[in-house]
Amino acid sequence: MNIGVPVDRGVDVAAVQRRTVSTLAVSQALGGVGVTTGIAVAALLAEDILGSARLAGLAQTTQVLGAALAAYLLARVMAARGRRPGLALGYAIGGLGALACVLAGVVDSFALLLVGTLGIGAATAANTQARYAATDLARPSQRARSLSLVVWATTIGAVLGPNLVGPGAAVARVIGVPELTGAFVFTVVAVALSTVWLMTRLRPDPLLLSRDLASARGEAGTGLVSLRHVLAVLRQHPRAAAAMLAVALAHAVMVSVMVMTPLHMDHGGAELTVIGFVISVHVLGMFAFSPLVGWLADRVGRAPVLVLGSVVLLTAVLLAGRAPEGHSTGLTWGLFLLGLGWSCCLVASSALLVDAVPLRERPGVQGASDLVMGLFAAGGGALAGVVVAEWGYGVLNVCAGVLALLVLGCAFVARIRRTPLPTAGA
């Protein structure tokens, strides 16, 4: 059932949209701090509990899977009740997950840790789904820019979060819990603040207001949210299917190469500080230029930016795949371009997904898209280790290049059956 808001004929949609984007940007920064702070030490806590690194990577895997599964759950909530309760629910579950991680460290329970990281995945899903809330009231010609500003705000959390690991250890000593669990205390605080901020500031709810504006024009309301229905919608809107596949493929390219790069560098004797620098450059490429990417996607179109993203990804894997073990300038540039290519694909594909389906179908399709994206990331990260162990880092980049070519194919499909952009709020 859609819980709408009364439509004031004199409502300033542009003002509400500006408030929505600024509210989402703050929640994105807080949520990003919460997610990255805890995940930065999840594998270390797992190793500490188990006494071995053999299964420590499962902490990261469950977080990725939790994000994928929660994306669909949150989409159902948002379709029924709006963006505000859906996003807040994701952060609330993430906070409970972080508390479970603290308790897992106290009682030395690996199973409880996995439950906790699975819950933190819900906060990751909320952090990701927020980009779509920025498009609900945006003008069609400004959707990509609005979306990209919310993505850009993630930079704050991505940079600040890992740097709170040290202070987290100090907090842990004060409250009498294991040092590695202190980072999860910051996660609890950050996602709690994000939840409160969204519940108090994201008013009116952008999705509900856009629906009520559409209803005032005599357009249909809420669509169904089920995987079967989403598949039916994708069959009717092939450009949406192309957008969904493109962002999932680009995410798999980015994750698979990124997670194996520290190992490739370590095998060549690179120091941890150098490895950290290269990953920081990669994160910079992922988020710092997203407003420029959004502007470009609105100016020249979604498909051309998707083509650009595919080409940048291909360049990235070419540079990274040819880099020797250890540190090199080529590898650093490759990881930077890997992040930038992902940014182009994420922003362009997400905006295309909004353009390609009617308002009533968007929450379900968007949730399904993030579900698929998460599953591709989990699969890519898991298979990357196998490929590197059997054939090496270079072959991994060749495989990633094949996926990047498929993104290029999706971009060409996106150019076919081009339809006019719907009006604002539609």
Image: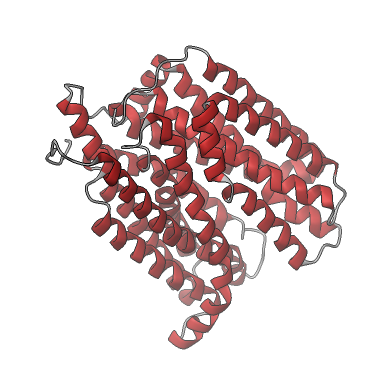
Place of residue 274 in the rendered image (x, y in percent of width and height, measured from the top left): 77, 63
**In the depicted structure, whether residue 398 falls above or below residue 237:** below
Q: Residue at the spot x=83%, y=56% of the render?
A: 327
Q: Residue at the spot x=35%, y=42% of the render?
A: 133
The foreground one among 386 and 27 is 27
**In the depicted structure, whether residue 172 falls above or below residue 238:** below
Which quadrant would the N terminus be assigned to in this image?
Answer: top left
Place of residue 34 in the rendered image (x, y in percent of width and height, measured from the top left): 46, 63
Which quadrant would the C terminus be assigned to in this image?
Answer: top left
The foreground one among 164 and 90 is 164
Q: How many marks?
A: 0
Asked whether residue 174 is in view, the answer is yes
Asked whether residue 251 is in view, the answer is no
Q: Residue at the spot x=40%, y=34% of the render?
A: 366
Residue 212 as seen in the image, left or right of residue 78 = left
Q: Residue at the spot x=37%, y=38% of the render?
A: 135
**Toward which corner of the image does residue 4 lie, by quadrant?**
top left
Residue 173 as seen in the image, left or right of residue 361 = right
Place of residue 399 in the rendered image (x, y in percent of width and height, measured from the top left): 73, 33
Place of residue 295 in the rendered image (x, y in percent of width and height, measured from the top left): 52, 37
Looking at the image, the residue that sits furthest to the top is 417
- The colour scheme is secondary structure
The foreground one among 366 and 122 is 366
Residue 84 as seen in the image, left or right of residue 144 = left
**Toward which corner of the image does residue 305 lie, by quadrant?**
top right
